[in-house]
Image: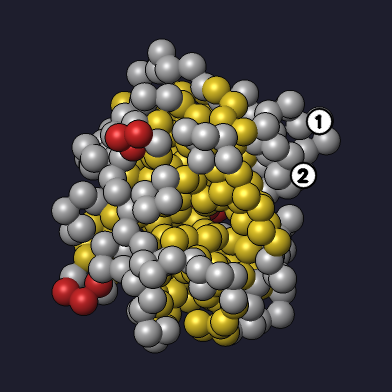
Amino acid sequence: MGSGTEVETALQASAELGEGPTWDPAAGRLIWVDILGARVHTFDPATGNRTLMTTEQHVGAAKPRAGGGLVVNLRDGVGLYDADGGFSWLHRDPSPGRRGNDAAVAPDGALWAGTMCYDETPGGGTLVRLAPDGTATTVLDDVTVSNGTGWSPDGQRMYYIDTPTRRIDIFDVHEGGAVAGRRPLAGIEEGAGYPDGLTVDADGCVWVALWDGAAVRRYTPEGVLDRVVGLPVQRPTACAFGGAGLADLYITTARVGLNEPSPQAGSLLVLPDTGTGLAQPPFAG
């Protein structure tokens, strides 16, 4: 069940709360955020080139748009950056004490954006589906820490994590992108950390980063744990496949709340040649 793959530091950094790695195939680069640092990072592993953009608010996620630019999940809602850096709001929904957290783009090009309260008030967060035209549908309104979201290779299942539940859940996807039938895929046992961000590979297996668990795990579509990779950081936050052939698993990490973080905490890690990812669609808006 263990992995022979050796974790490497793809990019030494000191992000307070690194999150949301996303491979942008059009640009051949990885996009990731430092939520509490209000920064969007990009990294091209082939050249080592990197960019840094500061946002006006805490940024929970940043995803590529079909026409260039980014869609970002901010404190007060979801915004759009166009290719030359101009900003506009797509869906503004401020709520005192709440911010955007993880987000994901569905196979149909819609954005699923989660929120949470800064103090992690139980049930204080949401999961909202944003159509490309900005139409917002609240799918869940009783979430505590909205996190990993992803879809099976055939698009028939959506996986979702509300971190304090310690579960990876499954929804059935229906026509028009609606979901129903929530049920557990797998639970994380006491003492193994908390499930945070996830990604789905080409085999339909679910990879999940374990906050305070110093590991990533892979679960089969039947919910069987079949791989565990230990990491040199206490708080890995999320993972995504990228690079040539989508073979490398990139992992974001956090320093926040740690009195003595490890040297790699806040850096971008990578497990080279560890699987095959699914190409992620850009946001269609």
Q: Position of residue 12 (x, y in %)?
A: 67, 32
Q: Position of residue 72 (x, y in %)?
A: 54, 67
Residue 203 visible in image? yes
Residue 19 visible in image? no
**62 or 258, which is in the foreground?**
62
At a point 29% along the width and 55% down the height, the residue shown is: 151
Rendered view: 276 above or below 170: above
Which mark is on residue 257?
2
Q: Mark 1 points at which residue?
A: 260
Question: On the rendered image, what quadrant is the C terminus found in?
Answer: bottom left
Amino acid identity at mark 2: Gly
Rendered view: 274 above or below 123: above
Disc 1 packing (10 Å; few <14; some 14–19; many ≥20): few
Q: Position of residue 281 (x, y in %)?
A: 32, 59
**23 or 216, which is in the foreground?**
23
Amino acid identity at mark 1: Glu
- SS at mark 2? loop
Report the side of 210 relative to 105 (left or right).
right
At a point 29% along the width and 49% down the height, the residue shown is: 279
